[in-house]
Amino acid sequence: MPTPPHPARPVSRFSRYALAGYALLIVYASLYPFSGWRWQGLLPFDFVLAPLPRYITVSDLLINVGGYLPLGYLLARTLPARWPRGVSWLAASVLASALSFSMESTQAFLPMRVSSNLDWLTNTLGGVLGASICVWLLPRLRLAALLRLWRERWFAPHVGYGLLLLALWPVALLWPAAVLFGTGQIGPTLLQPALDTDTWRVLSAWFVNSGLRLSDFTPISALRQTGVTASMLVGSVLLLTALLRPGAPRLRLALALTLTGLLAVSLS
């Protein structure tokens, strides 16, 4: 007697949006600062057969694996539900590895970035682990049902996009900032192309004549740093509390969010 097929995994629009947003975040982190593009005499794929880096740190390995683990999970989560589990796992793993390979290859044209076969391998490992968690681990341990139960018990309905925004906050903190919990300091980044490239030479002269030079961005005082830190933390906690149901453990969840942010800062 044939065995009944596995029940179809529901694919939500939220998962697709989360995948698109996370993939764009990886592209941004991999190709930043998006300036100085030029041919450096190396083929884009030379890094594959290059020797491993001489200096390897555990934090870099963890960041590479952890950065692609959610990608592998989201890829497996958004693939067609009618696909067998093995096919979904393999496809998600290959797609995650392909994205990492394309990012490392593109970095060959950026003087400030170094293509690395170790980064590609650890990113691929993260994608494989993420796909394995989605396809094999969660259904076997029934963790998905437990997480869904916690979400329904603690969080209000239709707050998926708010949770996604909240989850992106620790990810944004992985980028080093001058202020604790400081994100959104994009002024110098927006002015840099106008000040450095020949294409915007006229606009650059206008910025300089107006006194808007990058050297004018002086470090902020300790009082302002404290204000920025408090504002970012309070804003994140307020967003969390706005998503919760009455009776949810607000203090414990706020503390968990704060500790997650501190962990992300320590890894930056």
Image (spheres, helix red, strand yellow):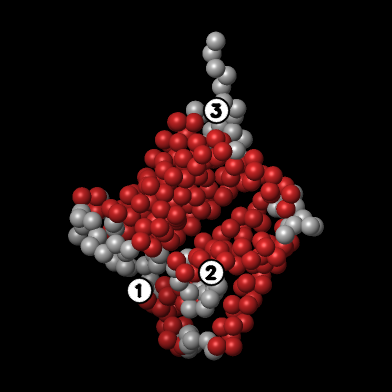
What separation in Å lies between label 3 and label 1 (alpha carbons)? 52 Å
Amino acid at circle 1:
Asp
Q: How far apart are labels 2 and 3 at the CA level?
A: 40 Å
In x, y percent, where is residue 203? Answer: 45, 78
Tell me the CA gap for discs 1 and 2: 40 Å
Q: How many marks?
A: 3
Query: In screen coordinates, is 89 left or right of 111?
Result: right
Of residue 55 and residue 205, the one placed in the foreground of this image is 55
Q: Name the residue tied to disc 2.
A: 262
Classify mark 2: helix, strand or loop: helix
* Residue 221 horizontal/vertical position (percent): 54, 89
Vertical comparison of 233 with 6: above or below:
below
**Residue located at (64% from left, 40% from top):** 145
**Mark 2 surroundings: few (<14), some (14-19) or many (≥20) residues within 10 A:** some
Find numbered disc 1 in the image and state the secondary structure of the residue it sits on.
Answer: loop
Residue density around tag 3, few if under 14, some if 14–19, many if 20 or more, within 10 Å: few
Rendered-image quadrant of the C terminus: bottom left
Lower position in the chain sequence, tag 1 or tag 2: 1
Q: Nearer the viewer, residue 139 or 24?
A: 139
Write the residue at 55% across / 35% down. 140
Q: Give left or right: position of 9 versus 245.
A: left
Splitting the image into 4 quarters, where does residue 142 fall? top right
Image-based side of 141 in relation to 43, left or right: right
The residue pinned by badge 1 equals 198
Q: Is label 1 or label 2 in front?
A: 2
**Residue 106 visible in the displayed image:** no
How would you rate the neighbour count of disc 1 (Cα within 10 Å): few for under 14, some for 14-19, many for 20 or more? few
The residue pinned by badge 3 equals 82
Q: Secondary structure at mark 3?
A: loop
Q: Position of residue 68 (x, y in %)?
A: 44, 51
Q: Earlier in the sequence, mark 2 or mark 3?
A: 3
Q: Amino acid at mark 3?
A: Arg
